[in-house]
Image (tube, helix red, strand yellow):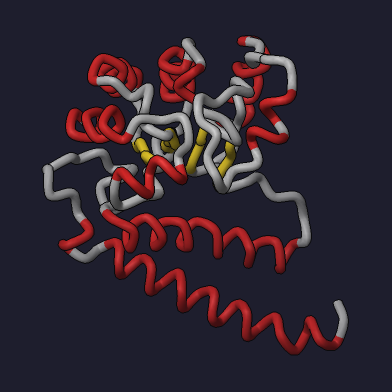
Amino acid sequence: MTFIEILISPLIRFFADALVAFCVSLEKLPFLRSPTGYNNPRVRRMVGGVGYWAHSFRLTLPNIRKWMETRGDLFPTVLQVQTINRCNAACAFCPYPYTVHLQEKRVMDDALYSKIVDECASEPDLHDFVPMSKNEPLLDVKMEERVAEFRRKAQPHQLVELVTNGSPLTPARIKRLMAAGVDLITVSVNAANEETYDKVMVGLSWKQVMSNLEAL
């Protein structure tokens, strides 16, 4: 360890511990609890942006400190997995149309997915499993099965989260995902009105997504 590392490391650990303590106290505040009475222990304190980011910092910072102390291999606290390399949008801010879209369509093999899930389920440092990466995950017709497999094998504290543009999130799909055991669904809208939405979320329907959100 260099002189600079010896000098700075205690300060980093101090501020990391203080921030974790602050995030833990935030998560205990009543206004961060679900107003709907949803009692899933994995997500009930993650209401709104404050709760979500407090949760993220609380998970990430201890791993940073662990790495500083051991310099050993760490398993991710959050893992994203792409099960299908397709999206139904061409968003103005996304590289997908110029990168992944140019590839041949591929869907992850069931055996490979099961291998990933088995490894994740054996790692207590993993907290968030997100079967989405540079794609629209709900274009995978097996997504409900994949969510159910993770939920069946996962440790109690491990949550499964979906990030979607919301267009395939029909009421029927919502029911199937809930039955499969999804903990958290994040919908990327990226606009406050239809005019902006049409410019940013190219290829999608504002009215359809708003209708799906109302059902959610």
Camera sees residue 27: yes
* Rendered image quadrant of residue 81: top right
Q: Quadrant of residue 148?
A: top left
Could you say where residue 63 lies in the image, as x and y percent from the top left? Answer: 60, 58
- Which quarter of the rendered picture does the C terminus lie within? top left
Q: Position of residue 10 (x, y in %)?
A: 65, 83
- Dividing the picture into quarters, in which one does residue 28 lie? bottom left
The location of residue 118, given as percent across then percent down, is 60, 23
Q: Nearer the viewer, residue 62 or 135?
A: 135
- Taking the image as shown, residue 199 lies to the left or right of residue 107, namely left
- 209 above or below 118? below
Residue at x-position 18% and y-position 28%:
215
Residue, far right: 2
Question: What residue lies at 33% left-to-right and 63% top-to-bottom?
Answer: 50
Direction from residue 97 to residue 127 in the image, left or right: left
Q: In the image, residue 44 lies at what x, y percent? A: 25, 47
Q: Quadrant of the N terminus?
A: bottom right
The image shows residue 36, relative to residue 131, as above or below, that is: below
Please state which of residues 84 and 100 is positioned toward the viewer in this rendering. Answer: 100
Q: Is residue 50 above or below residue 188?
A: below
Question: Is 31 displayed left or right of 177 in the figure?
Answer: left
Q: How many numbered marks are there?
A: 0
Say if residue 118 shows up in the picture: no
Q: Which residue occupies 46% across, 61% down?
A: 58
Q: In terms of depth relative to the viewer, which is nearer, 86 or 199? A: 199
